[in-house]
Image (spheres, rainbow, N blue to C red):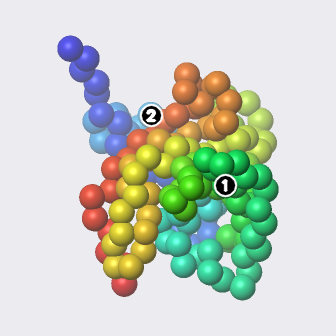
Amino acid sequence: MNSFLPIVGSDRIIDGIGAMQWKLLGLFPVMTASGSDITRSAVGRLQAESVWLPSVFCSDGVSWTSTDSSPLNFSLHSSFVVQGERAELDFTQDQTGRLKTCKLPRWGNPEGADFDYVDFGGILEEEGTFCGYTIPTRLRIGWYFGTERFESEGEFFRATIDDAIYR
């Protein structure tokens, strides 16, 4: 039996300022970070999270191109600006139009070295419709997406969405 100690915290951007704070058992700080690199990284996360608010992609400020297609998958590229940073977000869809993957270059330093753009994204395993929006409801996200490193060291977030309310 594995027993893990919970790490609780947040990676956030509020009023254009990014910060991270994570605590062991919700009490003991294990990571705290802020500054311009953290803000840029948080903007990249926000860009990826746009999949949970599909109306973002209906804006006049979003451009779309088809990048590749096969009988089983169709690839799309979207380009738009979030918090002053250009998003270059790639999607693959299956033959029914369901999103399968998303990927973008995200500012970060997953190895602890200098910050740079690193492939970030994930596998969108299930979807559901809430308040008229169809969104990913089960997904795996992380660094080095599209490489072997994603499975072995990059994936750090799994989520299942049971309900979503849009106001």
Q: Quadrant of residue 144?
A: top right
Residue 32 showing in the rendered view? no
Give the vertical position of 27 relative to 42 (above or below). above
The residue under the point 42% across, 74% down is 133
For residue 160, side relative to residue 145 (left or right): left
Residue 111 showing in the rendered view? yes
Q: Which residue is mark 2?
A: 30
**Mark 1, other Cα within 10 Å: few <14 / some 14–19 / many ≥20:** many
Toward the left, the furthest residue is 1
The residue under the point 77% across, 45% down is 117
* Residue 39, x across and y down, in percent: 65, 57
* Residue 163, x across and y down, in percent: 28, 64
Toward the front, the furthest residue is 71
Amino acid type, residue under disc 1 in the picture: Phe
The residue under the point 37% across, 84% down is 167
Residue at disc 2, secondary structure:
strand
* Residue 71, x across and y down, in percent: 65, 49
Quarter of the figure that contains the N terminus: top left
For the residue pair 31 and 100, the one nearer the viewer reads as 100
Q: Which residue is mark 1?
A: 74
For residue 159, side relative to residue 35 (left or right): left
Q: Quadrant of residue 146?
A: top right
Using the numbered discs, state the Cα–Cα distance from disc 2 to disc 1 in whole angstroms. 41 Å
Q: Quadrant of residue 147?
A: top right
Q: How many marks?
A: 2
Give the vertical position of 55 relative to 122 (above or below). below
